[in-house]
Image (cartoon, grey):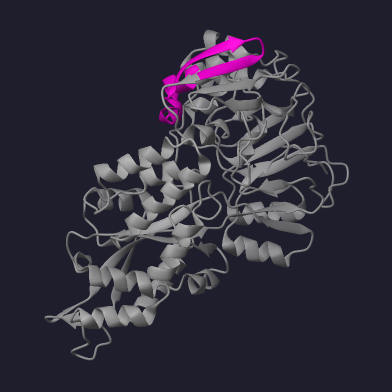
Amino acid sequence: MKKRRVTVFLLTAAMILSLAACGGGGYVDATGPKEGGADGAGKDTFTLADEEWYGTDLYQQDSWSSGQTLIADALFTLDPEGGDLLDGICTDLTASEDGLTLTMTVPEGKYYATGEQVEPEDVVASIEWGQEVSVYADGYSNIESMEVDGRQVIMHLSEFRSDLFYYLGEVFMGVIDKDQLDSLSKDELMWQAVPYGMYSVESYEPGSGVTLVANEGYRTDNPLVENKGAPAIKHVEVKFNMEDFTAIEELKAGNIDYINGITMDGKQQLEAAGGVTVAEKTYPNIDYFEMNTDKGAFADVAVRQAVALSIDREALSELTDGAVLPAYSMIYDSMQGFSQEAKDNFQANYANDRERAKQILADAGYTDSNGDGYVDKNGTNVEFTFYSWSTGPNVIVSQGLQEQLKQVGIKMNIEALDWNYIYENINNDEYDAGIEWLEWAEPILILNACYYDQNAPGNTDAYYAAVADAAATVDADERIAKVGEIQKEMFENWNIIPFYSEATYVAYNDYVKGINIVNGSLHWNDLSF
């Protein structure tokens, strides 16, 4: 389930033709017979099933699949342990003591697929382009100015914000040649941009797929990979939006090598098949729900408390065969800035205590006066409607939650909606409770975006001031402590409840080697047959 989508940009025929003409020759026609067999013998083209791509200009995208990281590197590499940024395109990132000056090196010897060397001026021009067009520009709007000194880029910040370091390690901040940025229009850059990466687009068929050719001038300083140079596999074929059944059968036949995202049914099928590896590739994410405190059953804090305390997340995880993983904090365990203290606090005080939930309801005057199995007060049952995703594991989770709440006498109805309608209803205060989802590895982004209910207690100026203060805290340990305190204060209202993290899986044939997944990020550098 993908909840963020970019608008498909319609290329003119001339642009498509010009793109198809670029790049080297010798690529095997994708419509012809595949080389090699199901054991991978003789293969020289890596074929993967992926979501649709909407361009090569990473700064104009608001979503970017892991398959697209084949064509674009980030400036730096996120540390899977949550520490300082690791080297990537750039190296040797340092910050001044006040956090207002960043210095990085752009090493020599890294070349675009066009043959041009990556220059410090390209980094400056790319970031300035992003500040102009990117939907994520706010994340680095505090870069006030930049200058080049030899092979170094020096950034001057208007203020320190920790989320900038997340963006510097994500592919939304890569490098495009300044010459391209100066000579091509915004529309032309959408598909003609050649970012620095392992591969470049050789041809593109709208809605169908792309073919990629290796960048022989590629080099990386990413410490998480062994191969620092050009990729071993010289051609890649990417197929967009394959049906699950088709992709699985093609994988088993050896006609495709890798599926970027499989359903739980597909996971079970492929785990039973021989010669296929199923691997978890879960990027840090959090599913949570809000309860409407303005009206209905949840205007009474006792009911909110009873719901929160009645959830058995481990049982729900088992119900989905591991498709969801229990979450006890808004900043999930695998995110940067994770606070163990906040998680422990939630587990100790807001979760896993069904008997306490029953007692809270009884103390608040709720009893099953008519013997229908549901508690009521003044003749009205405790009843609410839960907005659930219409697809994905939340369908099963919602049904499981419905049964768990029934055990304490709360009647939960389920209404499955597309994600955009859920958010719209919550934002308009037209809901009882509704599922929400955020996928970021950085805590400030989560905290700034998590409230959809505009009237929610906790959704206040003071809250956002506290988040801003945490973001501006240079010392990492102090910042994590503040992030933990913010969450603990959120939970006191019993209206925003961390629920689970969605697990995602990929599948590939056993003859594919070098799949390197680190904390949900896939590094393709060591890929081989």
Q: In which quarter of the view is residue 231 placed?
A: top right
Picture coordinates of residue 281, whole percent (x, y): 62, 52
Question: Residue at 51% of width from left, 15% of height from top?
Answer: 146
**Viewed as shown, does residue 228 lie left or right of 279?**
right
Residue 141 magenta: yes
Indicate whether 369 appears above or below 429: below
Residue 465 magenta: no
Front residue (pair 194, 74): 74
Q: Outermost residue toward the bottom?
A: 371
Indicate whether 225 appears above or below 337: above
Picture coordinates of residue 118, whole percent (x, y): 67, 16
**Viewed as shown, does residue 302 lie left or right of 209?**
left
Q: Outermost residue toward the left?
A: 378
- The C terminus, quarter of image: top right
Q: Is residue 257 visible?
A: yes
Q: Is residue 407 visible?
A: no
**Viewed as shown, does residue 346 lie left or right of 367?**
right
Q: Which residues are magenta?
A: 128-155
Q: Outermost residue toward the right?
A: 42
Picture coordinates of residue 182, whole percent (x, y): 53, 9
Q: Outermost residue toward the front?
A: 97
Front residue (pair 429, 349): 349
Question: Residue at 49% of width from left, 43% of height from top?
Answer: 442
State how many labels appear.
0
Question: Residue at 33% of width from left, 55% of height from top?
Answer: 490
Picture coordinates of residue 5, whole percent (x, y): 45, 40
Q: In which quarter of the view is residue 55 placed?
A: top right
Indicate whether 389 appears above or below 32: below
